[in-house]
Image: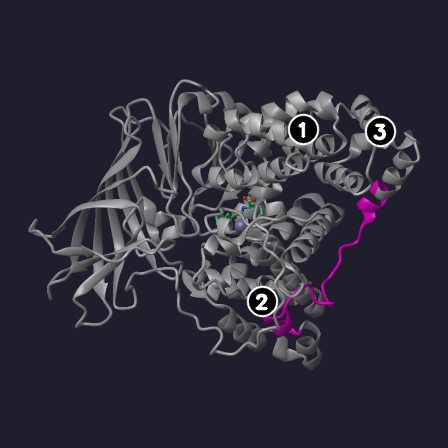
Amino acid sequence: MKKVVLFAFCMPLLFACNSRGGKSKKEKVTAPQPATESVFDNNDYHTLSNAGEVFGKHLALDIEVDFKQKQIRGTASWDIEKRKTEADKFILDTRDLKIDSVQYEDGSKAAFESGETDSILGTPLSISLKPETKKVKIFYRTTPKATALQWLDPAQTFGKKQPFLYTQSESIHARTWIPVQDGPGVRYTYTAKVKVPKGLMALMSAENPQALSEDGVYDFKMDMPVPAYLMALAVGDIKFQAIDQRTGVYAEPVMLAKAHKEFEEVGAMVHKAEELYGPYRWGRYDILVLPSGFPIGGMENPKLTFCTPTILAGDKSLVNLIAHELAHNWSGNLVTNQTWNDFWLNEGFTIYFERRIMESMAGKDYADMLWEIGYQDLEATVADLGEQSDDTHLRLNLRGRNPDEGLTDIPYEKGGHLLRLIEQTVGRNKMDAFLTKYFNENAFKTMNTRDFTEYLNKNLLNEVTEWKANVNINEWLYGPGIPKTCPRADKVRFNKVDTATAQFLKGDMSFAAKTGKWSTFEWMHFLRKLAKNNITLEQMKTLDHAFDLTKTQNSEKADLWYLLAIKTKYEPAYPAMEAFLNITGREKFLQPLYKEMMNSPEGTKMAKSIYRKARPNYHPLTQRVIDEIVK
Ligand code: BES
Ligand code: ZN
């Protein structure tokens, strides 16, 4: 499947490629880059702040959420610490944020200046400091351009009665709702007072309420230091239900029971994660299920994972997404990528950890399906980006680009597979001891690719000469494509699916009896295989008759089924697909469907008509992406 999307339009993407949605780039062939310092330094080029000189170490937010004006306004007070005594400016990141005034601790006016605006990075806010300044208070408001915010009308929620707001700050969107030193290498603690309309609940990546506040005012505290991309807020008609002592679910009241059922094993999952890599350090682990417009699958906001309702399949078959976000509480939230070039240290580790959790919950054969699906995604992404593309290196070079462009399957799957290769090289016991030590020794710190390599050699690979040669880590980090040493999973369960597919293609339906035991991943493998085999309209009818696929409530199955329906012009599935596209905002599902429709004149007509109605339900960044597909 060749995608042609112009590079310039990829800039504001939330998601960049294949299974993660969006972008594709015309193939670019360049020689592999050597891992030299002159090519890669470890500066963060995606913040305009001066955290190296003066850094904001604690934030006290005092904000009001105004649904009528779709605006957050209030104050951000920063406790600052000078790293260079002569420093006389505190510089923060902002983008499309309106700064009204700035005060010193005694209430006197502080001089401030907004610098030149960069279209990707935004506008630096530079505040003059006096030698004795320890605190500054910024009066500000958000604007309609804030890319971190999605404001939902009541009609866009499950309950249909109350509006909803949520933030998505990663990678560099926190600066559109808070003036903050917005780099993953800068950590701070925070408190927040948030005023919302009475009757609504507010939640943050912090200690959270479990019941409504009478006056609509909520107080939050996060006393472990976190980077800005983990700042999160959600406001809506939300209720809480406990899973166990330290885990629970938040959702709109009409979704709560379903969500609770789906996640009833999450308490056990946290224990499994702890058995693998040490204690969960964040106190509570709760999950917030968002309305269906949420543009991504999940976000690892500390103490409170945000997730899409599209994983509520009714049979717990998509909870690996929760395993993923939970795993981030070690890889990412404890040990954080120093810059967005090192993004694989967040996501590759998390993919590995996620699949280890799933293996311990559901068995090796199950985890092997996740690895194989992931490998297929990796292959497709490498084909899409170009085998020699620099963007297939684990260590990225995103200087001058939007960091969201790094969001392809490369950091996830190539990164995850590198860790699997290390595991297979040194053995599981050594691997697990190493990772536990890594998370403990680097907790609440940042890590870059070079320092990780050193740490890995020193603490693991140096032990046996062949290990280093076998892993050949520089090829993975600084070279293109998929290294030949890339591990492949056993296909115990998928081999059976392959047999079934071959039978089906020959008109033999005897495999149908066995599909009762298929998990979502077997179905995905089956449907992906069919997509490669040009199946006929007749065969689509047979499948739908046998398995009722048009009516499936499983989003992953639905997405692949609708793709087939567009390809084969299987019209009975169109109304269900239209309904799906109208309410689902998850970009990874939307992109392939709209792209497939645009491949034919009738499809183009259909895409335009569906998108006209559905567009207001999508996240502002998703709208920009789909705008470039449907035109
Ligand atoms: N942290 C990411 C989401 C993210 C990354 C948002 C970069 C914006 C910029 C999250 O942990 C994630 O990877 N989500 C995946 C889940 C999947 C891999 C199980 C998603 O949303 O698809
Ligand atoms: Zn992730």
Q: What's under tag 1, amino acid-wise?
A: Glu
Gap in angstroms between the C-alphas marked 3 and 1 = 21 Å
Q: What's under tag 2, amino acid-wise?
A: Phe
Is disc 2 surrounded by few (<14), some (14 to 19) or many (20+) residues within 10 Å?
some
Image quarter of the C terminus: top right
Q: Quadrant of residue 31?
A: bottom right
The location of residue 483, given as percent across then percent down, is 70, 67
Q: Secondary structure at mark 3?
A: helix
> Sequence order check: which comes first, mark 1 or mark 2?
2
Please name the residue that numbered disc 3 is placed on.
Answer: 539
As for residue 435 lying within the magenta part, the answer is: no
Which sits in the foreground, 190 or 393?
Answer: 393
Above or below residue 449? Residue 523 is above
Above or below residue 273? Residue 618 is above
The location of residue 131, given as percent across then percent down, is 11, 66
Q: Which mark is residue 434?
A: 2
* Magenta segment: 472-497
Q: Quadrant of residue 142?
A: top left
Image point (39%, 64%), residue name: 45
> Which-is-in-front pick, marks 1 and 2?
1
The location of residue 306, given as percent across then percent down, is 47, 39
Above or below residue 102? Residue 629 is above
Q: What's under tag 3, amino acid-wise?
A: Gln
